[in-house]
Image (cartoon, rainbow, N blue to C red):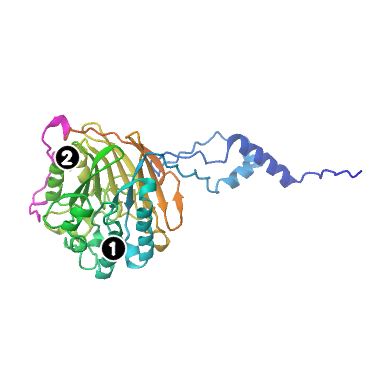
Amino acid sequence: MNVRRLRKPTIFGSYFRWALVATLIVGLPGCSGSSMGESKAVSSRVESAPEPEPERRPAAILAKWFENLPCPLPPPLPFVEGSSTLAVLPDTQVYTDRYPETFERQVRWIVEQKQTYDIRFVLHLGDMTERSSAREWQTAEKTMGLLDGVIPYAIATGNHDYEDKGWANTRRSPLSTHFPVAKMRKVGALGGTYNAGVLDNSYHLFSAGNRDWIALMLEWGPRRGVVDWANKVLQTYADRTAIVVTHAYLFHDNSRYDRIRDDQPWNPHHYPTAKLPGGVSDGEELWNDLISHHGNIAMVLCGHVLGDGAGYLASKGDVGNTVHQMLSNFQMMPGGGRGYMRLLELLPDGKTVQVKTYSPMLDDFMTDDQHQFVIELDVRLGRPCKNNQPCDPYADRKKTSGDGANEGG
């Protein structure tokens, strides 16, 4: 009879078994997960009390090694039957400049999946182009045109979408040439614009997820006159749940752009546009002058910011509504973004939204807590401003002489 003899355990084998037991009991160190509501600067990990001579314990040695390993990511959130979806395209500038096939892949996927995910609307967050060249705009027109007559869409302008090579030193943009207002009334559910015949500031009306919506698309660094107009539009449609889209609003540290801070690059006040008639508004100014006043605003969406290109902030408006403010931008990745975009899945209960980040090019979901999370809509419809009084958009701003005195319209 053959007898298999057990080998004497090695030191490494003993250490490994100790670490395995420790892992099964307490899990991988640092992999407890974090909340999207927390600042990225604050770790959600809880440090345990030090043990005596921890460096000599086998489990501690392996635990130290595991600290530098990435934590396992959760699986993609499953699509909930009966949900509707809003597709969000941030900063496609590198695609229109160098990788048009990636942009086309994104939009074709949206069209192909219209029925599967009940995609009701598409929102572009601005910076459609890199240098605002004729070639880039032709690519953008052709690609977004795949949605014509299939799914309505809306477009915000980014700082790269203005003439003179995208340097944001003028308010002239080719957007309305390639996406005429007359056409957008037919294919974009367009309700109106700030200036007749100019798409740079527009609002769009649609229904999705058992709600009637208004998408308010505001120009890069909105001027004072635009903010006044936006207040009136939101008052008029106070019975609709609102999404406000503007290119630069939230920074990647989960705070709004604020001109008084010196640690937030790419603020609209840092660009030549700020010296033009009407000036500009950054995130904090938009919050004080517009967003906080309207109980029907559910979300603010923006792009623009580099770094890790992700941010989230939930704030209470004047009438108690919760405003979910979200930054997404993937242009820093290889190939200008690897095809990633945002999907806002509106669940049948009418209040829950699953926020997802997906690339049709890679057929991949990013599931870390910056790119996959769940929010609940909490709006106050029919109450346009605090105490149902007319909005005073500049009540919270101390105006200085000459600031925005000449509105460019």
Residue range corresponding to the magenta coloring: 385-409
Image quarter hosting the N terminus: top right
On the image, the x and y values in percent for residue 296 come to: 22, 37
Picture residue at 12% right of the left edge, 45% below the top? 399
| Residue with the mark numbered 2 | 237
Q: Amino acid at mark 2?
A: Tyr
- Secondary structure at badge 2 equals loop
Front residue of 231/18: it is 231
Q: Give the main secondary structure, helix, strand or loop, of the magenta stretch.
A: loop
Picture residue at 36% right of the left edge, 68% below the top? 98
Front residue of 42/407: it is 407
Residue 19 falls left or right of residue 211: right
Quarter residue 214 falls in: top left
Local packing at callout 1 (Cα closer than 10 Å; few below 14, some 14-19, many 20+) is many
On the image, the x and y values in percent for residue 209 come to: 31, 39
On the image, the x and y values in percent for residue 128 come to: 28, 60
Residue 394 is one of the magenta-drawn residues = yes
Q: Is residue 111 above or below residue 317?
A: below
On the image, the x and y values in percent for residue 264 come to: 30, 52
- Secondary structure at badge 1 equals helix
Picture residue at 24% right of the left edge, 41% below the top? 213
Quarter residue 96 falls in: bottom left
Name the outermost residue toward the top.
387
Q: Is residue 341 above or below residue 319?
A: below
Picture residue at 41% right of the left edge, 44% below the top? 372
Is residue 109 visible to the viewer in this orientation of the structure?
Answer: yes
Name the outermost residue toward the right.
1
Q: Which mark is residue 126?
A: none
Residue 292 falls left or right of residue 344: left
| Residue with the mark numbered 1 | 140
